[in-house]
Image (tube, rainbow, N blue to C red):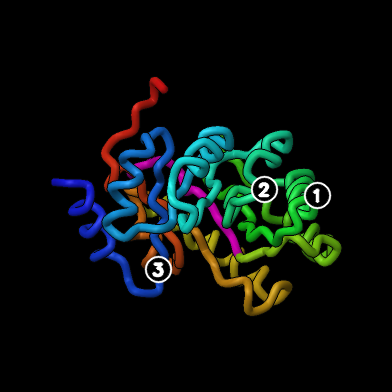
C-alpha cells in the first residue's frame, strides 16, 4: 500500500474531531513530502536538530510538533518555528520555553506530559507535582507559553485493560486541570499506531501515528 493510501486509511478510522499528527521522526524529507502532497500538514518529531533541518527544507505551512523528550539546552533550536511542544515534563523545561519564546516574540503552544505508564523510563510529570505547580499560578507568569492540554504514553503491553487504565488516568488528569486554563485547554494527546483506537474511545482528541503511515522506522540512524 502506498504512503498516501496508508495515510487515507488511518484518517478514515478517526472521528472528525480527532487531530492526526503524522510521526515522521527518522524518515527523510522526501517521505514527509509524500504525506504533505496527500494533504497532511501536521508532523511530529522527537529530535530538535532533525526537526530544525526538516523545517528548513520543507514547506513552511507545515505545523511541526515536538513529541520527544526535550532537553532545556535544545529548546533554542526549535523555538523560532515550532507549532507545539507536546513533551513538557518539568518546571525547568517550561520556564526555558518561556524564555526562548520571549526572545523570538512568539507564543508557543505546549502540552503537559504526564507519566502514567508502568515503565519508569517513560517521561512525564508526576500528576500531583504537576497539579501543585499549576495551582501555584506559575503558568500565569509565563505569557509566551500557551498550555493547550495534556499528553501521555500508555504502558507498552498487550494487556488492553492496563492500556485503557492509563488512558483513562490521562483523561482524568485532563479534566482535573481544565478549570485552571479555560477554553484554550482542549487537547488530549494520547494514542499511537498500536493503540490509538483505544485512546480515541477514552477521549483522545489528538493521536500520534507513525509506523502505520510511514512504515517501520530505521532505528540505526
Which is nearer the N-term, disc 1 or disc 2?
2
Which numbered disc covers residue 18?
3
Write down the residue under mark 1.
99
Within 10 Å of disc 2 (Cα), the crowding (few <14, some 14-19, many 20+) is many
- In this picture, residue 184 sits left or right of residue 219: right
What SS does tag 2 mark?
Answer: loop
**Helix, strand or loop under label 3:** loop
Task: Name the residue: 60% across, 41% down.
Answer: 123
The residue beneath circle 2 is 79
Queried whether the magenta region covers residue 221, the answer comes back as no
Q: Main secondary structure of the magenta part?
A: loop
Residue 119 in sight: no
Residue nearest the viewer, comparing 221 with 196:
221
Q: Position of residue 14 (x, y in %)?
A: 31, 66
Question: What secondary structure is found at the residue carrying circle 1?
Answer: helix
Residue at 63 percent across and 74 percent down: it is: 184
Relative to 7, residue 174 above or below: below
Which image quadrant: the C terminus?
top left
Q: Let me know if residue 152 is in the magenta part.
A: yes
Q: Nearer the viewer, residue 144 or 181?
A: 144
User: What residue is rendered at 64% in x and 57% in y?
Assistant: 110
Number of labelled discs?
3
Give yes or no for contact between labels 1 and 3 (Cβ–Cβ under 8 Å): no
Q: Which residues are magenta?
A: 149-158
Residue lying at the far left in this picture: please name it: 1
Give the Cα separation between the discs numbered 1 and 2.
10 Å
Residue 50 locus on image (x, y percent): 51, 34
Q: Earlier in the sequence, mark 1 or mark 3?
A: 3
**Mark-to-mark CA distance, 1 and 3:** 31 Å
Is 66 displayed left or right of 167 in the figure?
right
Would residue 39 be seen by someone viewing this image from the given angle? yes
Q: Residues within 10 Å of mark 1 (few under 14, many from 20)?
A: some
Amino acid at each position: 500500500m502506498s504512503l498516501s493510501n496508508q495515510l487515507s486509511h488511518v484518517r478514515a478510522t478517526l472521528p472528525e474531531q480527532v487531530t492526526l499528527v503524522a510521526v515522521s521522526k527518522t524518515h527523510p524529507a522526501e517521505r514527509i513530502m509524500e504525506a504533505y502532497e496527500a494533504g497532511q500538514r501536521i508532523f511530529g518529531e522527537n529530535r530538535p536538530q532533525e526537526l530544525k533541518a526538516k523545517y528548513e527544507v520543507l514547506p513552511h505551512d507545515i505545523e511541526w510538533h515536538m513529541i520527544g523528550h526535550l532537553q532545556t539546552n535544545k529548546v533554542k533550536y526549535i523555538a523560532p518555528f515550532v507549532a507545539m511542544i507536546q513533551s513538557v515534563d518539568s518546571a525547568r523545561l517550561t520556564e526555558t520555553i518561556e524564555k526562548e519564546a520571549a526572545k523570538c516574540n512568539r507564543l508557543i503552544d505546549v502540552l503537559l506530559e504526564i507519566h502514567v505508564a508502568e515503565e519508569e523510563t517513560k517521561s512525564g510529570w508526576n500528576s500531583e507535582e504537576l497539579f501543585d505547580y499549576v495551582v501555584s499560578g506559575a503558568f500565569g507568569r509565563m505569557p509566551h507559553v500557551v498550555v493547550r492540554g495534556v499528553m501521555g504514553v500508555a504502558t507498552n503491553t498487550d494487556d488492553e485493560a492496563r492500556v485503557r487504565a492509563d488512558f483513562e488516568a490521562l483523561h482524568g488528569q485532563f479534566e482535573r486541570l481544565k478549570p485552571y486554563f479555560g477554553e484554550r485547554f482542549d487537547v488530549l494527546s494520547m494514542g499511537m499506531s498500536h493503540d490509538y483506537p483505544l485512546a480515541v474511545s477514552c477521549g483522545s482528541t489528538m493521536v500520534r501515528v507513525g509506523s502505520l503511515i510511514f512504515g517501520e522506522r530505521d532505528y540505526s540512524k
